[in-house]
Image (cartoon, helix red, strand yellow):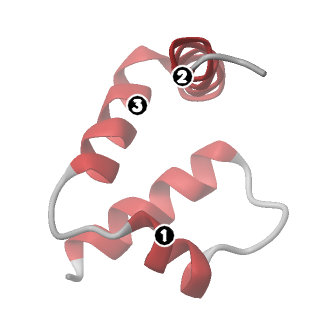
């Protein structure tokens, strides 16, 4: 089983490889802001087959409309 540190590092690396440093950081900030509930948003808004960039745009749009 992977440690939390390894999972965090792999997740950040995946975001950076798909979005680049700036957009990866923006995505993390958007996900971290309150009152954004990623789990609730994912259950209601996440479509299968989205690219990381499309997912990021949906997350940004969702958080702006809260």
Mark 2–mark 3 contact, CB under 8 Å? no
Give the quadrant of residue 43.
bottom right
Which corner quadrant holds the N terminus?
A: top right
Label 2 – label 3 distance at C-alpha: 23 Å
Decide if residue 37 is on the left or right side of residue 21.
left
Q: Which mark is residue 39?
A: 1
Which corner quadrant holds the C terminus?
A: bottom left
Q: Secondary structure at mark 2?
A: helix
Decide if residue 15 is on the left or right side of residue 24.
right
Q: Which mark is residue 23?
A: 3
Of the numbered discs 3 and 1, the one sitting upstream in the chain is 3
Decide if residue 37 is on the left or right side of residue 55.
left
Q: Is residue 25 above or below residue 39?
A: above
**Residue found farthest to the right:** 49
Of the numbered discs 2 and 3, the one sitting upstream in the chain is 2
**Residue found farthest to the left:** 34
Q: Residue under label 2, please give it.
A: 4
The structure residue drawn at horizontal position 84% and vertical position 61%, both measured from the top left corner, is: 49
């Amino acid at each position: 089983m992977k440690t939390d540190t390894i999972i965090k590092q792999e997740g950040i690396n995946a975001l950076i490889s798909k979005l680049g440093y700036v957009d990866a950081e923006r995505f993390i900030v958007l996900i971290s802001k309150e009152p954004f509930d990623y789990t609730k948003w994912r259950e209601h808004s996440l479509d299968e087959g989205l690219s990381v960039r499309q997912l990021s745009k949906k997350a940004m749009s969702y958080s702006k409309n809260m």
